[in-house]
């Protein structure tokens, strides 16, 4: 039976989205009798100085944590050193461990890991599966990373495409991402769309009266517009901030920010400068065991993605919101991945990036219509139960890996 090796910079007990999704899949596969190894770092997403155990078995998964630098996400060059040191350590270990016939599943943290991993898989006669949570170098180019506009970026993209073509399979997390890969001449029969997921058996609707966080955070009598997760360079918050300014006359409406990310400090400074501190509440990432309460606390959630990044990233936080039976206000491209889902399943409202008035009106319309909120929340949960649940995605992964193991 083929062994399965996953490579990603973070794994349990880290709380980041890629870590949680990988942990779920790895444990599911060991539960099905598979031999699973994870090559990861000794760090956590929020603590690059952390030093987790270098070797351990967690719920049957053999975890190998390699050393890497710990500069963190604050600076571009420090992040680059973290990436390069992880490439080196992880790929040396992969070379030592992997054998012919094994399956190597490569995620996209750090970016472009598929390029060197493809060389190791080819040399060792292992099967390569790329699991694309995002698409680099295009994201970095769109976000203005120096030196990538021009020949260097073009060369990196070509090497990335070669690694995708050489793979046994490429798994993407959205239909627009799938279309992008096919447009780059990646064989369509090698591209599989398997959406990300949340723990929909643990996350479900909780009434405000039964939610202890409402009273703990002193939000009992408020209409809460929530954001949960990372607020990074790929996300727009100016549309929401403009809406908050327009809603100054509604002290009962509060914007709750749960999580972290590159832009959280910038947002907090702008909130203070505009005199909106009373309309905002900032909280850190919540433990996974408390997600049910934190996701159900808001009356409505918002998320965003810069339109130029559609097809390159899919905000996976949407699935947790839907599992909690809450409506979503999706800010960005009205033809974007999440905006399409929101419209198709009637579980939220799409808003064009920069349309602060439109977002303010959407918030007010949901504030004034509890029945509409309830129906949208019901539709969101129905979408999870019928189309996007964790069990469906895990089964799709299992079926793909079984297919790859069949004699050719």
Image (cartoon, rainbow, N blue to C red):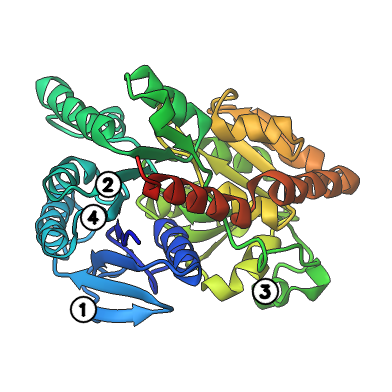
Of marks 1 and 3, which one's residue comes earlier in the chain?
Answer: 1
Which circle, 4 or 1, is nearer the viewer?
Answer: 1
Mark number, residue 324? none
Find the residue positioned furthest to the right.
371
Specify which label sits upstream in the sequence, 4 or 1: 1
Q: Which residue is mark 3?
A: 213
Left or right of residue 17: residue 334: right
Identify the disc placed on residue 74: 4
Using the numbered discs, state the Cα–Cα distance from disc 4 to disc 1 in whole angstroms: 25 Å
Q: Nearer the viewer, residue 3 or 164?
A: 3
Is residue 55 shown left or right of residue 312? left
The image shows residue 275 at horizontal and vertical percentages of 54, 51
Residue drawn at x 76%, y 69% as measured from the top left: 220
Location of the N terminus by quadrant is: bottom left
Residue 149 location, quadrant: top left
**Label 3 SS:** helix
Position of residue 157 in the picture relative to residue 305 (left or right): left
Mark 3 vs mark 2: in front: 2
Q: How far across and how far down the image is residue 296, in percent?
A: 70, 62
In the image, farthest residue toward the front: 407
**Real-space Cα separation, disc 4 to disc 2, in angstroms:** 35 Å
Name the side, left or right, on which 101 lies relative to 310: left
Percent across and percent down for residue 84 are 11, 52
**Mark 3 or mark 4, which is nearer the start of the sequence?**
4
4 or 2: tag closer to the N-terminus:
4
Looking at marks 2 and 1 on the same chain, the residue that comes earlier in the sequence is marked by 1
Tell me, yes or no, whether the two marked residues, 4 and 2, touch with CB atoms within 8 Å: no
Question: What residue is disc 2 on?
Answer: 127
Q: CA distance from mark 2 to mark 1?
A: 26 Å
Q: Which residue is mark 1?
A: 54
């Amino acid at each position: 039976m083929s062994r399965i090796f996953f490579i990603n910079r973070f794994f349990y007990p880290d709380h980041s989205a890629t870590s949680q999704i990988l942990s779920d899949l790895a444990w599911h596969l060991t539960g099905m009798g598979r031999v699973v190894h994870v090559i990861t770092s000794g760090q956590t997403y929020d603590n690059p100085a952390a030093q987790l155990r270098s070797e351990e078995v967690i719920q049957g998964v053999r975890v190998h944590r390699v050393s890497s630098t710990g500069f963190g996400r604050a600076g571009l060059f420090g992040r680059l050193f973290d990436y390069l040191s992880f490439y080196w350590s992880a790929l040396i270990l992969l070379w030592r461990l992997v054998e012919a016939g094994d399956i190597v599943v490569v995620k996209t943290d750090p970016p472009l890991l598929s390029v060197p991993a493809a060389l190791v898989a080819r040399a060792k006669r292992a099967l390569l599966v790329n699991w694309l949570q995002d698409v680099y170098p295009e994201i970095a180019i769109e976000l203005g990373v120096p030196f990538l506009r021009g020949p260097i970026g073009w060369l990196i993209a070509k090497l990335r495409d070669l690694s995708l073509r050489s793979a046994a399979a490429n798994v993407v997390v959205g239909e627009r991402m799938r279309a992008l890969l096919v447009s780059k001449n990646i064989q369509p029969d090698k591209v599989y769309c398997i959406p990300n997921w949340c723990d929909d058996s643990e996350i479900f609707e909780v009434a405000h009266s039964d939610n202890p966080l409402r009273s703990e955070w002193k939000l009992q009598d408020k209409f809460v517009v929530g954001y949960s997760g990372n607020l990074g360079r790929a996300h727009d918050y100016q549309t929401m901030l403009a809406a908050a300014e327009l809603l100054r006359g509604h002290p009962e409406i509060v914007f709750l920010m749960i999580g972290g990310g590159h832009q959280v400090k910038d947002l907090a400074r702008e909130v203070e400068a505009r005199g909106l501190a009373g309309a905002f509440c900032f909280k850190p990432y919540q433990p996974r065991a408390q997600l049910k309460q934190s996701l159900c606390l808001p009356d409505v959630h918002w998320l965003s993605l810069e339109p130029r990044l559609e097809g390159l990233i899919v905000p996976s936080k949407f699935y947790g919101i839907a599992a909690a039976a809450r409506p979503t206000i999706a800010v960005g491209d009205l033809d974007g991945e999440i905006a399409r889902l929101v419209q198709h399943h009637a579980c939220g409202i799409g808003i064009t990036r920069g349309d602060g008035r439109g977002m303010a009106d959407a918030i007010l319309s949901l504030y004034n219509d509890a029945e509409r909120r309830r129906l949208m929340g019901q539709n969101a949960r129905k979408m999870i139960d019928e189309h996007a649940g964790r069990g469906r995605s895990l089964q799709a992964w299992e079926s793909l890996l079984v297919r790859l193991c069949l004699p050719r």
